[in-house]
Amino acid sequence: MNKVKDLQKLVHRHIVLLMLVNIISLGIYSGDNRWTLIGPNGGDISQIVVNGSSPEIIYALARQNYFVPDSRIYKSVDSGNSYQDITFQLIPLFNDQDVYIFQIDNSATNPNILYVATSIGIFKTEDGGDSYISCDLRDMCITCLTIDPQNINVIFAGTKENGLFKSSDGGNIWTSVNHGINSTQINCITVDPINNKKIYACTAPATIYESIDGGMTWIELSSIINPSRLVINPIETNILYILAGEYGLSPYKSIDGGLTWSYIEVGWPFVSTLIVSSDAPARIYAGTPNGICTSIDSGNHWECKGDMFPNNRDVASFALDPHNTSVLYAGTSGGGIFKSADGGDSWVKSDKGLEASFTWKVALDPSNDHIIYAGTNGGGLYKSENNGLDWQMKNQADAGVAVWNIFDMAFDPTNPSTMYIGSGCCKGMFKTEDSGNTWQELGTFSFVETLAIDPLNSSTLYANGSKSLDGGNTWFSSCPETIGKINKIAIDPTRPSNIYLITSNSEIFRSNDGGLSWARKDIPIPNSAKDNYHCTVALDSQTPDTIYAGLKGIYQSEDGGNTWVCKGLEEDCILEILVDPGNPDVVFAGSLRNGVYRSNNRGDTWESFSDGMNSSTVLSLAIIQQPTWTIYAGTTIGIFSYAENHPVINSIRKLSNPFRLKIIGGNINPDVKVYIGTSQIQWTNIKYKSPNEIVLKGGVTLKNLIPKGVPVEIKVVNGDGGSATYIYTR
């Protein structure tokens, strides 16, 4: 019977592998997929795993849960210099469900084996992410898992409602191991690195258990509120550290194997993650919302630094190179991954290709079509001056601004180098007069979700329910508190005294006098349509009395909000609406679950417009008309671009003696540029033959960039910014 099961699994893996090869040969990111992910790099990094036998191989888990769960697994094979998303083959196994990835764990001796704990069960890859299989425990919420450090076939999995499970055969068969445990919710599970028969389990609401027989039986050790992460001193294994607490995670230490605990005064009340050096266990690192704290005496004294990372101080995850503990990786809660080669004294951003930045707002410089701004959640503000090929942070802490969450942006119509950003996390609104190099704080806002500038008088600004007449220096209330929380402000471009806003209660208000008075413009919607994640409002710039409101579905008014008509899409929540300024018949809608919709007849009918976009939630849209019509979408994993005149890649063929690559497609311009690999190395030795064909020359040098059997990303970019990407395997 076991042989039959093994044969079935083997056949299944070969089928998956063949499917993958076929997909790659066709170009899973070819020009047929019109949207291209252009960055910026970063994301909310909840876990980093460095392989024990091959430390150049690193796995990172990026996740968010603001609108719908969106978790991504990234892999680096060059010590964190570059990453690739390896989630693509896993997502189809989710069967269109909203799935949250809680944890990953990598075999210490086999870098290709990775287990994935999710809200619907456990999945496993044995080939480094090229394919995945389900490991039973289906439909269970797996909150944590760990691999026995001395036996890679032994895995423990903790669940939210079904207790603890153990597998002794690499995840094929699971057995409930809850004898002595009186809780069904397991928060963490940790195996003693020296004696793998000794195991600790943290359970909700407040109990720590110990097993000394490999998990078969358990005894209660101690009680502590919400134990969430337990770390063992790798040499003196009676010394334990735990993160626990009712309102936030705080660090505690035990010197008697978990029987008693004492609070550790780190210097910051809450700690997100903690790691102990494997070769010098007196050295401990703690990640806090305000940077990294380090102890060299087992937690008795600490040194804390809050200025290590320019875009986010909230350290959410750590990993050490087991072969060189001076090499340390830190993941932030929105700002990506940083790497230190000197034990944490200095850091560099190290997440090329890790495109998981939750992008609230994409904005285009009105004076330069190559400049794009990205307002991210946790990563702050990014700027690209070359259509998204490269990004720079524009909210450095040493410039006096350490703002993490950027919700909205607006440019001065008379001077685009002057820009305003609305943000959250302690400070609300900032202004730059030099395109983001320096900033000044405006007002006393703590949170600005939406802002707008009078298009005919750039000194007049609106932010939330406030108004400024002097460029943001002083503010006064322009909305009564009864209006409630404002989600979006829209100003009539020809009659700026006409202002529209939509609230989180799905209510539209209009002012005809610059915000002195407001009238509610009721939309006849069912109560179910008011249960929205985020409402939006947009105007037709050519006929501003035509208004679109995004709720559950899209509603349109052609008389300034007096009467409304439902324009469809009621099955989805509409988060953003954009009317093409060059052709108001064309309307785009960014949705919660289905990417982008497009209408060519002012919303009478809609079509899906998401080909190639592997993010379902679109938060913002922006468009340029010249030199090439291009639309940008801010999503939960970054910015996607779609160029009307983008190049197309149909196939890539190898030519021999000398080694060359022939790229066959269409719409390829003579000024084309080519970038190879996740590091985006620009290849300049190009022979342009026609709009349908180019040849990359270079012989051995080019060949070395494309290892045999390894999928390599090749990006073709026209001079006007249109691009196409192809995954080529030699």
Image (cartoon, grey):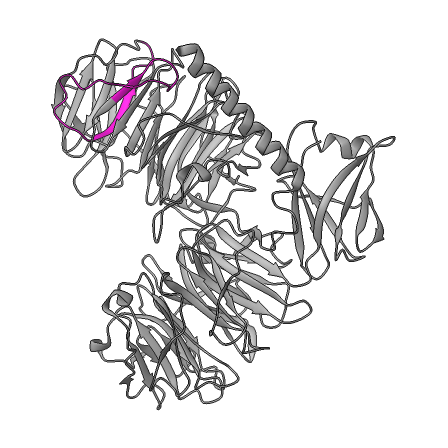
Q: Nearer the viewer, residue 704 or 444?
A: 704
Q: Residue at left 25%, top 30%?
A: 159
State whether residue 105 appears in this view: yes
189 magenta-colored: yes
Q: Is residue 14 left or right of residue 320?
A: right
Quadrant of image for the C terminus: top right
234 magenta-colored: no
Q: Is residue 419 left or right of residue 288?
A: right
The x, y position of residue 5, in whole percent, is 42, 16
Q: Nearer the viewer, residue 704 or 424?
A: 704
The residue sitting at the right extreme is 657
The x, y position of residue 520, in whole percent, is 27, 83
Q: Residue at left 77%, top 35%?
A: 702
Indicate whether 657 appears above or below 438: above
Q: Residue at left 17%, top 13%?
A: 217
Residues drawn in magenta:
165-194
Instruction: Determine the image quadrant of residue 198.
Output: top left
The x, y position of residue 176, in whole percent, is 23, 19
State whether residue 52 appears in this view: no
Q: Main structural element of the magenta stretch: helix, strand or loop?
A: loop
Numbered circles on residues, count: 0
Quadrant of image for the N terminus: top left
Instruction: Determine the image quadrant of residue 164.
Output: top left
Q: Nearer the viewer, residue 481 or 173?
A: 173
Q: Residue at left 22%, top 23%?
A: 201
Indicate whether 420 appears above or below 41: below
Q: Nearer the viewer, residue 513 or 419?
A: 513
The x, y position of residue 105, in whole percent, is 40, 26
